[in-house]
Amino acid sequence: MQKDDFLSDEFLKQFKTGEDLNNILKQIQKRGIEKMLEGELDGHLGYEKHQTSDNPNTRNGYSNKKVRTSFGASEIQVPRDRDGSFNPMIVPKRDSMVDGIENVIVSLYAKGMSNSDIEEQIREVYNFEVSTSTISRITEKVSADIVAWQNRPLEPVYLIVWMDGIVFKVRENSKVINKTVYIAVGLRRDGKKEVLGLWLGKNESAAFWMSVLTDIKARGTEDILITATDNLNGFTETINNVFPESKTQICVVHQIRNASRYVVWKDKKAFTADMKHIYNAPNQEAAKAALEDFASKWDSKYSYAVKSWKDNWEDLTVFFEFPLEIRKIIYTTNLIENLNGKIRKYTKNKLSFPTDEAVMKSVYLAVREATKKWSMPIRHWGIVLNQFLTIYEKRVRL
């Protein structure tokens, strides 16, 4: 068969099954890899095959190499140079796996599969063996990506930053303890969301958030217009110490959960309905009146819940200062809680993590998977941007 006939109609007609198709695609991929290797060597030597050159380093035949790809194992011919300095990028020396299958392994790991599960999946789907140690080596490469990503420069201004923590069990000194991955998500001036970073600490605290905010500032962020947080004690003061002009909105959903925690089941429906009148009020004055009605009805029975509304009132009602479209995106931390839910989904198979590095690697990969579709501005972005420009023109244009 001539090479020109490789993809002719007559040639393709002989393939009737999925296995036949996989075999032909495998051959096409094999030839494609070999062609790319030839091109890499041309670039390395500075001249193409059959051309003359003053370069003392010349082609020196081929070596056979078995590689693993998404179509299974193949044996390819790798061109060599005389002084042995050629190290191809597509299949590096001492490596037997093409990037495509490595990406598959990383993706499966990101979705919460264990190394042994990935090993079995690769064997069943791609029909070749890859050891758990090889899988570990591949996923370890992610650690360098995390360092680069965690230290990348940030935008000078974020319109909104949502902040929250998610707890994982991590082994430390022969014990399994709770540790918190702190997450910050920013709304940029182009309307797109961006995860600013991941930070690992022990129990969530305002003191640790101080180090997070300091890191965000050190990486180039000069101003945050609005922060959306849970009602962690001391959080607002911590934010104002680093970004003194930022407005802090405590998450209303967190407040509702906390206030309802000690309410008996038979009262919960009426209790939550009365709270709804507070945060659904058209303005702060109406909300204050709804709070007074709420207090007069429930204070004798659930004084703690009423007190929690009154103690946090200033930070719970910041959203009333803004137009309706901005209110909807700041009065809850739903956006970051949805992200946390996806992280939980990807990491649910991991009951605990052996090291800090392991939990950070898993959460980073889960974030990478969960944010793949964050390519468009938020809904009604044109209206929201105009509202921000009207209120904060000088700061938005910083």
Image: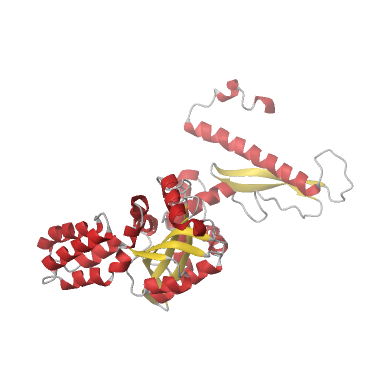
Q: Position of residue 334 (x, y in %)?
A: 34, 56
Q: Position of residue 86 (x, y in %)?
A: 75, 52
Could you tell me if residue 186 is visible in this image? Answer: no
- Residue 152 placement, left or right of 45: left
Residue 269 sits above or below residue 40 on the image: below
Q: Is residue 274 visible?
A: yes
Instruction: Give the residue furthest to the right.
Output: 54
State how the image is colored: secondary structure
- The residue nearer to you, when weighing 116 against 213, is 213
Q: Is residue 115 left or right of residue 40?
A: left
Count of number-bearing discs: 0
Please state if 318 lies on the left or on the right of 182 as rendered: left
**Placement of the C terminus among the 4 image quadrants:** bottom right
Q: Nearer the viewer, residue 170 or 17?
A: 170
Q: Quadrant of the N terminus?
A: top right
Residue nearest the viewer, comparing 228 with 41 = 228
Rendered position, 26 above or below 149: above
Q: At x 88% / y 41%, what residue is drawn?
A: 52
| Residue located farthest toward the top when viewing the structure as drawn | 10
Looking at the image, which residue sits at the far bottom?
173
Which residue occupies the foreground of this view, 148 or 77?
A: 148
Q: Is residue 151 above or below residue 70?
A: below
Coordinates of residue 254 in the picture (x, y in percent): 28, 63
Q: Position of residue 338 (x, y in %)?
A: 36, 55
